Image (tube, rainbow, N blue to C red):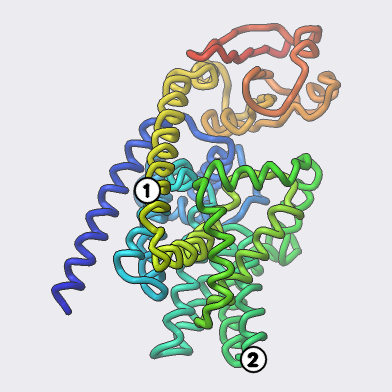
């Protein structure tokens, strides 16, 4: 028995090592930060040194984790992204442990293999966004709930509640998991368990609540501020886009298996199957009908549970002896998805190498001082890399923006960022076009000096 256990963890250990190497390669393929990465890194910098660019309404926990690592290593983009990679690996490992509660070891490994090579995981598994850490904390909380069914019940329930709060602090919408756990306990009439889970959920939130109150006089300031910013500046996208994302960015067969898996899961009278269903259903309702922006990465926070349900359906098909055909189709689609992701990232790598934004950042490093202000439709890149105050081109009246912020430069990118009419900048008598940078894929950045 011990030999089998040792062999099992050697196999999963080798798989995680290969996955680590894969993420490092993908990270190398993507040299330029994405939009929110600049923001989280700017916020993290503010906790260990001076940062001119911050957005305090962002999800709080990730920036503190990065700042903590930077305190020992020094500021490093790679260290921040390595933290996300470690969260990705830990998520796969704990999903494997959870899967063994429902499936055999081989089938659990198969599930984690497909999960780890899901295009969403491959694309976001190394980027300094809050989604992967939030996914990990949700998985870990669920793992502790499973453990609470055995020994030391109170301890594991307390840990589950505490970690669920960490998921919330990493990404506020993951409160849906804590809500799902609460509904599950109520339905099962486990009120004592609900009380322990809730108590330690609240305990974990106390530092956040206290910090908000001392800083802003409002216990949930950043939660409210984020809601206001999102409601003001994001436009609604059609529900069909998020449904399409499920097929394109996860795996074509997973949504089909999900429907079968829901049927199988409902029929099975296993503990915590109901919690999984509640969380997945609530998450779908929230992201389809209540979130304006239909971004595929929003699936990440409940993606492991989508796979758990879907593989219930696949396990059912295995018993019906048509597993071999589904498996072959799944393998083909997985390979195609993986090739597509690698091809997409390789193309991005070609464009991102010495991109127009990178060129403009390098140019402005020698032109701006620490107290200068830059206006741009892609302001996060300049805010983080130049460590100066930046503001967006949020008004068509450029004169008002120049008078309000007194910038030294206005930077416009024609292939990225918020929409803005370049002609407004060209026709302004207060601006002089100073430099134009062209990227390898034709995108341009225009730098205007304020005169």
List x then y, in percent, for residue 106. Answer: 30, 65
Label 2's element?
A: loop
List x then y, in percent, for residue 419. Answer: 74, 25
**Label 1: how many residues lie within 10 Å, few (<14), some (14-19) or many (20+)?**
few
Describe residue 371's horizontal placement relative to residue 404 as left or right: left
Label 1's element?
A: helix
Q: Which mark is residue 74?
A: none
Q: Marks 2 and 1: which is nearer the front?
A: 1
Residue farthest front in this picture: 321
Describe residue 381's horizontal placement relative to residue 80 as left or right: right
**Label 2: how many residues lie within 10 Å, few (<14), some (14-19) or many (20+)?**
few
What residue is shown with label 1?
328
Q: Which mark is residue 189?
A: 2
Q: Is residue 291 visible?
A: yes
What's the distance in space between the residues labelled 2 and 1, CA to CA? 43 Å
Q: Nearer the viewer, residue 315 or 402?
A: 315
Quadrant the C terminus occupies: top right
Q: Quadrant of residue 195?
A: bottom right
Sequence order check, earlier mark of 2 and 1: 2
Q: Is residue 70 visible?
A: no
Q: How many marks?
A: 2
Describe residue 62's horizontal placement relative to residue 198 as left or right: left
The residue drawn where x is 57% and y is 87% is: 196
List x then y, in percent, for residue 442. Answer: 55, 12
Q: Nearer the viewer, residue 331 or 152?
A: 331
The residue drawn where x is 53% and y is 71% is: 264
């Amino acid at each position: 028995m011990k030999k089998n256990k040792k062999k099992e963890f050697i196999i999963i250990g080798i798989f995680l090592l290969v996955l680590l190497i894969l993420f490092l390669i993908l990270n190398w393929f993507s040299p330029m930060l994405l939009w929110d990465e600049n923001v989280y890194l700017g916020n993290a910098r503010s906790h260990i040194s001076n940062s001119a660019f911050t957005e305090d309404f962002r999800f709080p926990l990730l920036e503190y984790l990065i700042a903590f690592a930077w305190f020992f290593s020094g500021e490093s983009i790679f260290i921040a992204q390595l933290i996300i990679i470690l969260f990705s690996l830990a998520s796969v490992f704990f999903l494997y442990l959870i899967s063994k509660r429902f499936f055999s070891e081989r089938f659990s490994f198969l599930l984690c293999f497909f999960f780890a090579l899901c295009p969403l995981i491959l694309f976001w598994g190394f980027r300094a966004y809050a989604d992967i850490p939030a996914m990990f904390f949700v998985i870990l909380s669920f793992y502790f709930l499973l453990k609470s069914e055995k020994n030391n019940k109170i301890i594991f329930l307390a840990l589950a509640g505490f970690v669920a709060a960490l998921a919330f602090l990493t990404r506020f919408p993951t409160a849906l998991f804590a809500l799902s756990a609460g509904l599950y306990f109520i339905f099962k009439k486990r009120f004592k368990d609900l009380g322990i889970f809730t108590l330690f959920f609240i305990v974990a939130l106390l530092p956040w609540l206290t910090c908000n109150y001392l800083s802003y006089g409002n216990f949930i300031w950043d939660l409210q501020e984020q809601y206001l910013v999102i409601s003001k500046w994001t436009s609604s996208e059609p529900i069909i886009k998020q449904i399409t994302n499920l097929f394109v960015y996860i795996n074509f067969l997973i949504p089909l298996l999900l429907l079968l898996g829901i049927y199988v899961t409902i029929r099975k009278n296993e503990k915590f199957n109901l919690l999984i269903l509640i969380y997945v259903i609530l998450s779908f309702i929230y992201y389809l009908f209540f979130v304006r922006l239909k971004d595929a990465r929003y699936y990440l926070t409940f993606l492991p549970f989508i796979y758990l349900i879907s593989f219930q359906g696949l396990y059912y098909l295995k018993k019906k002896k048509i597993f071999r055909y589904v498996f072959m189709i799944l393998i083909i689609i997985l390979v195609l998805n993986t090739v597509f992701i690698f091809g997409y990232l390789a193309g991005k790598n070609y464009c991102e190498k010495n991109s127009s934004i990178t060129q403009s950042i390098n140019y402005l490093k020698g032109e701006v001082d620490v107290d200068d202000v830059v206006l741009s439709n892609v302001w996060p890149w300049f805010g983080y890399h130049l460590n100066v105050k930046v503001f967006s081109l949020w008004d068509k009246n450029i004169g008002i923006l120049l008078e309000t912020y007194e910038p030294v430069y206005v930077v416009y990118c024609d292939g990225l960022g918020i929409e803005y009419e370049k002609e407004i900048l060209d026709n302004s008598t207060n601006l002089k076009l100073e430099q134009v940078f062209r990227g390898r894929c034709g995108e341009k950045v225009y730098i205007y000096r304020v005169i």
